[in-house]
Every structure is written in C-alpha cells, then in structure tokens.
Amino acid sequence: MSDILNPYGLSSIFTKEELEPQTRKSHSGKRKMELHIGIPLEIDEMENRVALVPNSVYTLIANGHSVVIQSGAGINSNYTDHAYSEAGAEVVQTAELVYRCNVIIKVAPPTIEELEMFHSDQILIAPMQLPTVTDEYLAKLKQKKVIAIAMEYLQSADGSFPVVRIMSEIAGITAMHTAAELLSNVKGGRGVLLGGISGVPPAKVVILGAGVVGEFATRTALGLGVSVRIFDNNVYKLMRIQQRMGRQLHTSSLNPVYLEYQLLSADVVIGAIHSKEGRTPIVVTEPMITKMKEGSVIIDVSIDQGGCFETSEITTHAKPTFSKYGVIHYCVPNIASKVSRTASVAVSNILTPLLLKAGETAGIERLLFDHQGIRHGVYMYKGRVTNEYLSRKFGLKFADLDLLLTSGV
C-alpha cells in the first residue's frame, strides 16, 4: 500500500497533471466527493501562520472543492482577504460560519471554546501538541464525535513526519538568524558578528542535537562562517550530519564534562534535543549556565517539550527573551511562526495534495482506509481514542483504528 506523503509532504503517486486545476464535477462527472473546507482565524496570539495559502485555495477550488475562510485569517502571514476572495474562497466574518464546514484545518490546536462549535463526523486537521493536551480537551472531542488528525503525526512511507520535518528545517534556520540578531549590542548581546570578518575570528556556536533542527542550524552557521560544535548521543546522527554537510565537523557525544568546557567559550548555544515521548531531558544545568560568558545567547528550540536548559522558561513573540546570569535566553515555543509566510506555504504544500487525493477517493475517511501514513495521525475517531499514548496517559479506553475502519463503525 503506497503512502501519499513523501518526506516533503508531496505525493509520490501524483502526476503533474493531477495537481493542475481540473474540470469541476458538474462538467466532468469525475469528482467523487466535494470537500467543504473551513479555515478559522487563529486566536492564539503566538500563532501567525495560516493553514492554506491563496495559491492552494485556488487549486482546491479549481478541482471542485469549496473553501470558507474567516476574515483576517491570513493577515499575519501577509495574505489579505482580497487575495483569498480572488482565489475563489468565501470570506466570512464569524467563526460559526466556518465551523459549518465538514473539514476544519488549523495550524494551532482548537481551544475548548472553539470545540463547542464542532459537530458530529466533522474532520479536524490540526496539531495536537501533546504537552498541552488535557482531560477536558479530550472529553470535549469525544463528546463531539469528530475525527481528529494530528498534523505532526502524518507519516510518510519512509517513516518520517513531513510537517515536523519542514517546521524543523525552518526552526533550525530561524534559530541561527535569531542568534545573530541577539548577539548585537542593540539586543543586549556581546556585540559579536556571528560570522566574523577578515582578521577577526567568528562566533562560536554549540548545537545540542544532530536531528533536522540541528542539521539546518549547522548548515546556516557554516554558510556564515561560524565555528560550530555539535553534540548528540546518537553517533549515527553525528555521522549523517557530517555526510550531509560534506565536511569534517567538530562533533561529540553529550559528555557533561566536555560540554561544560565548550560552554565556557560559547557565544551561542542552540538546544535542539527532541524527545519521542514526554519531556525533553535537561542536558545543560543551571551551574553550567552560571559559568557562560555575559551577553552570550541561549536559544531553546526544545522548549515546546519542556526545554533542554534548566533555566529555560517559555517566552512569547511579543517578549521573546529574558536574561539570567547575564545570559540571554530565547525560549519561544512556536519559532516557525516568526517567519509565518514561509511556514504557511510549507504547511499548505503538505496539506493540499492530501486534500486533493481525499476528493478523488470519496473523502478523507476513505483516504484513512487506504493510507497507513494518514491513519497514523488520527488520535480521536468519532468519540473513540485511537492513540495508545493518550489512552495510557489519561486512562481512556483505546480503540484500534484499523478495526474501526474495517468494521464500518
């Protein structure tokens, strides 16, 4: 069984012609199901992205679907209501009108208040953000009997997670750009140019974690001429990042003694440790941070899983930093939202082929039956918990999604 998602979210089974606008159902007779897609305005003040950009809306509508978007939903990504209207979307003023659609797409989890507007058999495609899930949230989803699909758990045939990967790429690049900004005098930094110049050595950056975030942070740093140190306990990841960079890098396992030695002279430390389940482990203790240089910078990309620095505290885009022991801390969970337009296009590129295929296969429920990678993202199915971790954590009865789909429940 083929999966519709490759590592970058685009279908390996789509032809170029399938992604081009097609004749509408009423003319061709080929359309099996028209999706009614709703995009509400995100009410989280830290969320600037939008789930579908106008180009994707145009493609979906040209292929026979309808899109309803709440006024202002794209403003923070610099997409106007007029742009969506020109793409063929219906722009409405209230969220209630959006939630009448049978498919709701969000880039932030719905609030309890938003869940009140859902109805039975509705399909929700949005991040789950496991650390923020509560008993009340799950109880409301169960009550509404919706099909909830976690964006971050959509899986490709090779086992990777396209939404997580693309957001991690953005986070890695953005983290390094943010570090360069925070090192400047106007931001309270040491007044150091990240890449250095002729006769002046570059800044020293320590990167914790050699996954996707670490890889793209390293790629950006090397492009600027930065001196990089990479730590990870997975030797395979360290080997892989060297192969992808095409050069020998300064790498090490997460040895506390050697890590502390490197932190003493570091200008920037980027935390990119990822936990597959639960909280990220703390690898940099408070005593280590007290010994760092004044005006140095910490960027904790792992903060959405609790953070890998003992001194980390969640910050916002409105107030992204705080200083402790003279070290600047940047701990914004949703770092990709800082470059919301790029991030919106990236998410939209992943979701659009999925929605197109759903229309061709008699809807998203049929797509779940056909594609294991999309089933992997389902954590609630019509009042039943289908995610084993959620079931264990909250003491809820687990239902096997494969059995539910084959039984036609």
Image (cartoon, rainbow, N blue to C red):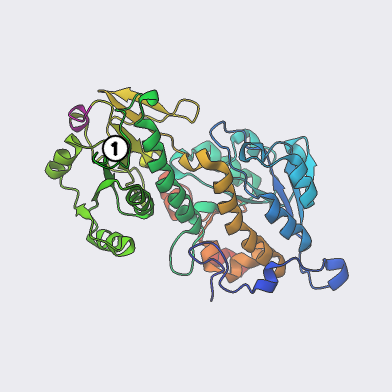
Q: 254 above or below 116?
A: below
Q: Residue at x 13, y 44 (%)?
A: 258
Q: Foreground: 106 or 334?
A: 334
Image location of residue 190, percent across then percent down: 29, 28
Farthest-out residue, front: 198
Q: Residue at x 59, y 57 (%)?
A: 349
Q: Is residue 97 visible?
A: yes
Q: Secondary structure at mark 1?
A: strand
Image location of residue 71, percent across then percent down: 74, 37
Can residue 291 be found in the magenta stretch? yes
Q: Foreground: 126 or 229?
A: 229
Residue 398 as seen in the image, left or right of residue 17: left
Residue 307 as seen in the image, left or right of residue 387: left
Q: Foreground: 283 or 396?
A: 283
Amino acid type, label 1: Val
| Residue that numbered label 1 is attached to | 268
Image location of residue 237, percent across then percent down: 28, 60
Q: 74 above or below 186?
A: below
Q: 58 above or below 112?
A: below
Q: Residue at x 29, y 50 (%)?
A: 209
Query: What segment is highlighted magenta in the picture?
Result: 288-293
Residue 95 as seen in the image, left or right of residue 280: right
